[in-house]
């Protein structure tokens, strides 16, 4: 078997004796890298005045790491400007926050070409390449330009909107066509797959339907949903241990017997933080029995501070938390505890476990791992309740959560109220169903499934019932003209003319 080459925007080279990072891709790939060797390639996270040729390398276990630095201009144009100032809001349906600049769009493409130029000399003929996320969408096409004939897969971690939204991006169709350089394009949910297929149908002139395949110049590109998971059992064990640790015990004793509601995320405008604070205020206003009985802990790790909309968000949150506390606090009770920094993973796991409510209410989210971690962390005998935005990819696989529209403060407050009063049997039933599903679909399995389809062309084991239903519907409607469509068992294939 050839090597697995992972390409991600930022690469943290582990210190020599370090265990793999507790979260993220490193955990997903841990098992994969036990059986095969690999190369992990990407930006070092460093910005330097003089960028050197080539890459810096290090070997850890079976994996070679190869990283390079970015210049200040590349960092501003590619990363801050186009990736985070244009693509991030675009993919999260926030057109009003887009600040497009042609120079930055060109920097984005140039940095992708630079990734390709530096990677090509490191590749072996039988390598499989797996590219990650929106910063690197055009990388596959840039590698093909340089002659790569490898199997290349791409996983898109964030939502994929329909074409009516996506086409707001200048050069939208070129970016969609770039996706056809991949052998497999994975997204998080069936809703995202629907968006991606809608974009492909309108933006590339090719028609396809559910679990689509597109053929262009002899290459078949598959488009599929591969919902990412977490290391479920591992996280559950960490949480069970963490309740005995001082950090969790101190938190519990500080509550003075009150219930705890928790939210944890990066400080990002997609996560619905101000809306959640407003919903908590509605809880206190509409259901006064919770006054002085429930405390809301919000842990929000600062991120992307050099983008204006993130600084504005920070200011809004500071003000809102202050106002709610000013209006509702008692001398012995602060309704909102707001911690704007990262918290050690073990502590977070313990905090989830002692929280009666997990509040995960993004306005849009590819998946949202916090929702899964919260469920994994619960005591199965006396679990808390997850209040979950229907706009998180996680909602597709967690129908037993209390699903809410995060923009409806009173509706979210009602769900919080219901969660705080939910009988134990019902909590156990809902939690058990979600936990079983999470345990069966952990993150190592996600990586193996994706790679199996990429390397062996096997379809994913079971389409969701929703997808099967939609597929039945779409296969009975006729495809518009412009490309030939051949029917196969359960899917359609589009061939570019
Ligand atoms: P993110 O937008 O970063 O990821 P998410 O999936 O929730 O969002 O993952 C965040 C991770 O950071 C979780 O493991 C969480 O425990 C941790 N975390 C959050 N707040 C923290 C804090 N204050 N301190 C310490 N740790 C904290 C992107 C997409 C998601 C997709 C993932 C994975 O935006 O939709 O689920 O990639 O594909």
Image (cartoon, grey):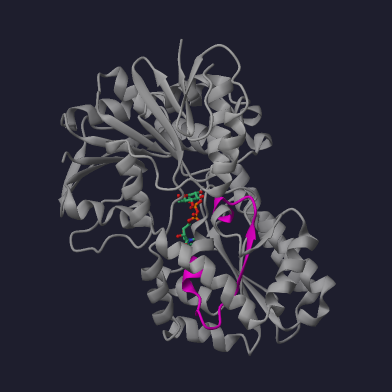
* x and y, in percent, of residue 307 in the image: 56, 42
Magenta residues, start to end: 373-395
* x and y, in percent, of residue 220 in the image: 37, 24
Q: With respect to residue 477, does 226 lie above or below?
A: below
State the residue in front, 378 or 45.
378
Whether residue 63 sits left or right of residue 491 in the image: it is left
Q: With respect to residue 119, does 45 lie above or below?
A: below
Report whether residue 65 is seen: no
Residue at 78% from the left image edge and 76% from the top image edge? 328
Q: With respect to residue 452, does 199 lie above or below?
A: above
Residue at 69% from the left image edge and 77% from the top image edge? 420
State the residue in front, 348 or 453.
453
* x and y, in percent, of residue 288 in the image: 82, 78
**Residue 226 occupies which quadrant of the picture?**
top left
Whether residue 163 sits left or right of residue 48 in the image: it is right
On the rendered image, what quadrant is the N terminus found in?
A: top left
């Amino acid at each position: 078997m050839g090597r697995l080459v992972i390409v991600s925007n930022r690469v943290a080279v582990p210190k020599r004796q370090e265990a793999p990072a507790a979260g993220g891709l490193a955990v997903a790939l841990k098992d994969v890298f036990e059986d095969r060797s690999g190369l992990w390639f990407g930006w070092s996270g460093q910005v330097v005045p003089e960028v050197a040729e080539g890459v810096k390398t290090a070997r850890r276990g079976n994996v070679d790491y190869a990283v390079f630095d970015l210049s200040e201009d590349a960092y501003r144009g590619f990363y801050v400007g186009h990736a985070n100032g244009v693509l991030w809001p675009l993919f999260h349906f926030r057109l009003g926050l887009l600040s497009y600049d042609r120079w930055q769009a060109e920097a984005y493409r140039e940095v992708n070409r630079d990734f390709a130029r530096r990677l090509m000399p490191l590749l072996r003929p039988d390598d499989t390449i797996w590219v990650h996320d929106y910063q690197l969408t055009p990388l596959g096409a840039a590698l093909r330009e340089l002659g790569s004939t490898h199997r290349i897969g791409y996983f898109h971690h964030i939502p994929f909107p329909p074409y009516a939204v996506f086409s707001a991006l200048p050069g939208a169709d070129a970016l969609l066509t770039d996706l056809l350089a991949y052998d497999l394009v994975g997204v998080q949910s069936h809703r995202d797959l629907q968006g991606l297929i809608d974009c492909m149908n309108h933006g590339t002139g090719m028609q396809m339907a559910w679990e689509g395949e597109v053929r262009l110049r002899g290459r078949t590109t598959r488009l599929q949903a591969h919902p990412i998971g977490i290391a479920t059992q591992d996280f559950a064990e960490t949480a069970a241990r963490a309740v005995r640790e001082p950090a969790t015990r101190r938190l519990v004793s500080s509550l003075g017997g009150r219930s705890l509601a928790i939210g944890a995320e990066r400080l990002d405008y997609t996560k619905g933080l101000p809306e959640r604070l407003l919903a908590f205020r509605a809880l206190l206003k509409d259901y006064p029995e919770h006054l002085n009985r429930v405390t809301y802990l919000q842990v929000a790790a600062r991120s992307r501070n050099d983008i204006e909309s993130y600084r504005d968000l920070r200011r809004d949150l500071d003000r809102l938390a202050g106002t709610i506390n000013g209006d509702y606090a008692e001398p012995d009770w602060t309704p909102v505890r707001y911690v704007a920094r990262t918290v050690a993973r073990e502590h977070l796991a313990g905090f989830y476990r002692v929280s009666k409510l997990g509040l995960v209410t993004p306005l849009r989210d590819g998946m949202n791992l916090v929702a899964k971690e919260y469920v994994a962390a619960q005591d199965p005998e006396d679990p808390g309740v997850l209040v979950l935005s229907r706009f998180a990819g996680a909602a597709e696989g967690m129908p037993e959560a209390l699903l809410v529209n995060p923009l409806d403060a009173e509706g979210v407050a009602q769900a919080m109220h219901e969660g705080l009063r939910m009988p134990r049997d019902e909590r156990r039933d809902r939690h058990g169903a979600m936990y079983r599903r999470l345990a069966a679909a952990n993150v190592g399995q996600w990586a193996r499934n994706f790679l199996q389809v990429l390397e062996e062309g096997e379809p994913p084991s079971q389409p969701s019932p929703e997808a099967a239903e939609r597929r039945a519907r779409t296969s009975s409607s006729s495809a518009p003209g412009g490309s030939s469509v051949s029917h196969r068992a359960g899917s359609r294939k589009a061939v570019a003319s």
